[in-house]
Amino acid sequence: MTGFCTRFAPSPTGFLHLGHVASACHARDRAGETGRFLIRIEDIDPQRCLPRFEQSLRDDLAWLGFVSDGEILRQSDHLPYYRGILDRLRCQGLLYACTCSRADVQVTAQGRAPDGSLVYGGSCRGRYHAPDQPHVWRLDMQAALRLLGGSPSWQESEGARIKGRAAEFGDVVLGRRDNGVSYHLCVTCDDARQGVTLVTRGADLFEATSVHRVLQDLLGFPEPRYAHHPLIMDEAGRKLSKRDGAESLRALRAKGLSAPELIALARQVL
Ligand code: GLU
Ligand code: ZN
């Protein structure tokens, strides 16, 4: 039997920290000897993703000994591909343009989605917009779920089948204003076209899986399994994050820790 195809998909928005190492270990372990482990660079956010972070990410992974079994896919190199996939959903009548500002979205929001994001109030649904008005593309979630006969579930590896909660997300953005694509769209497309059969990622992305399952079923993509792993927390019990200045691998390296020592540290959480 051949093993799973897994991936580690960091975004170059800062330096890698121990949480990333844990995630990469998890993906590589689950691929095992007989599967494939892929590295993918998720850099569609032009504001937050910087070349120097991408370079350091590549250096750190190589230093740690993580090698992708196949080309390292860089999402920003494939924007026309994702936009083409989005067109398929638009042709199915499942998208609408939303011209709301961030402030509009906040004022008219209908609470929070399971992942903590605001649920869009829907004021642009079914409304005409001039083509030259700046806009995002939103999924008409109710229309999508009608077509699918409900919110798709997923199989958590070595666990239960999890009930999807896509309806609670409302009309998520699939095409951003700046580049016409989105995290939900790109991650779903790439897991499918790279043949990923087991999506391993941190528990902070558990809820987003409901949205990814909807897109997979709408687009006729195969359904992968999922393994959401625990996150490494800081002393205050918050997840490590680049934003809060979690100690970077660079810094730990500079203190003299070796690659095997860092990997052993990261593994303690898995
Ligand atoms: N690029 C995402 C991140 O760095 C991970 C995406 C995923 O694993 O689905 O948070
Ligand atoms: Zn709107």
Image (cartoon, rainbow, N blue to C red):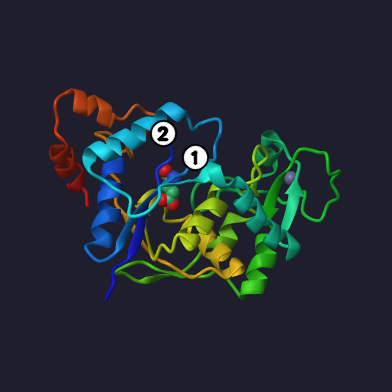
At x 57%, y 70%, the residue is 220
Measuring from the top left, give residue 238's x and y in whole percent.
32, 38
- Residue beneath label 1, please? 43
Question: Would you name the residue on which mark 2 appears?
Answer: 54
Image quarter for ligand 2 equals: top right
Whether 198 is drawn above or below 262: the answer is below
Q: Quadrant of residue 155?
A: bottom left
Camera-side residue of 102 and 184:
184
Residue at 56% x, 47% y: name it. Answer: 78
Residue 33: percent from left, percent from top: 21, 63
Q: Residues within 10 Å of mark 2 (few under 14, many from 20)?
A: many
Given the current orientation, which residue lies at the most extreme front position? Answer: 71
Where's residue 106, x and y in %?
Answer: 65, 39
Relative image position of residue 230 (x, y in whole percent)? 29, 51
The residue under the point 63% across, 56% down is 170
| Amino acid type of the residue tagged 1 in the rendering | Asp
Of 246 and 190, which appears nearest the observer? 190
Q: Residue 259 occupies which quadrant of the picture?
A: top left
Above or below for 180 versus 140 = above
Secondary element type, mark 2: helix
- In this picture, is 97 found above or below 16? below
Would residue 247 be visible to someone looking at this image? no
Q: Quadrant of the N terminus?
A: bottom left
Residue 257: image tag: none
Q: Amino acid at mark 2?
A: Glu
Which image quadrant for residue 70?
bottom left
| N-terminal-most mark, 2 or 1 | 1
Residue 48 shown left or right of residue 159 in the figure = right
Callout 1: helix, strand or loop?
A: loop
Give me the residue at 19% from left, 47% from top. 267
Q: Is mark 2 within 8 Å of ligand 1?
A: no
Label 2 close to label 1 by CB (< 8 Å): yes
